[in-house]
Amino acid sequence: MKELQILYLYPDILELYGDYGNIQVLKYRLEKRGIKAIITPYTIGDNAPNFKDFDIVFAGGGADQEQSILAKDLIKYKDNIKEAIENKVFFLLICGAYQLFGKYYKDVDGNIIDGLDVFPYYTEAINDRKKRCIGNIIIDVTLNGNKTKVIGFENHGGQTFDINTPFGEVLFGNGNKFGDTNEGFFLENVIATYLHRASSF
Ligand code: GLN
């Protein structure tokens, strides 16, 4: 039986709005195709993973406080992560994790959490903590030349700037920032998105 190695980052810290569902769905779909999913969780204090050894790396969303808890740990792996991305390991990053792969995240009080700086975007929370991009969101996405719609749920104060390669075009909701037409960040082997519980239709 074929096997696929999935690295699941910080499952105890980054788990908002059922982000674990991504792992469950990946496992289910792989098994339906006769591929065994081997899931390796990694969190602070565990043995260092070698990112290049995996086929897929997944990390979910987290509130500002959770992001600040793990950011320093994540940065230890910057070079290893860069190398894995260059080696075409596939990364799926949701919301809080999406933000942490950019240059930095500035919270509503002006505190800066350094990001991994492996991608060229940055995120700043809007100045009013009551204002957040919250609700259901629908985007148009082109995957392997096929157009599809992806629906999910967003809840973020962070506004993400300097995205040249978005994941999708917003049909309903906000996306990378209030009223944006772009959502997420997309490379051949990276999907970073604000959409929790995403499914396509
Ligand atoms: N802390 C970030 C924000 O509010 C991310 C939140 C999340 O992961 N949903 O912008």
Image: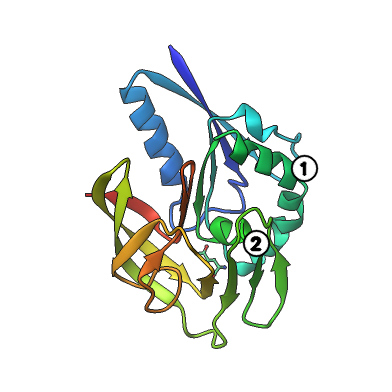
Disc 1: which residue? 45
Q: Residue at x 55, y 35 (%)?
A: 89
On the image, the x and y values in percent for residue 48 come to 75, 36
* Image height of 181 relative to 21, above or below: below
Residues 122 and 100: in front is 122
Residue at the farthest bottom position: 128
- The image's colour scheme reads rainbow
Q: Residue at x 47, y 84 (%)?
A: 131
* Image height of 180 relative to 139, above or below: below
On the image, the x and y values in percent for residue 139 come to 30, 61
Q: CA distance from mark 1 to mark 2?
A: 16 Å
On the image, the x and y values in percent for residue 3 come to 48, 19
Indicate the quadrant where residue 184 lies: bottom left
Query: Which label's residue is closer to the chain start, 1 or 2?
Result: 1
Indicate the quadrant where residue 123 lies: bottom right
The answer as to whether callout 2 falls within 8 Å of ligand 1 is yes
Disc 2: which residue? 67
Residues 84 and 173: in front is 84
Residues 20 and 95: in front is 95
Left or right of 130 in this view: 179? left
Name the amino acid type tagged 1. Answer: Gly
Do the residues bearing badges 1 and 2 touch, measured as CB atoms within 8 Å?
no
* Image height of 87 relative to 148, above or below: above
Name the amino acid type tagged 2. Answer: Gln
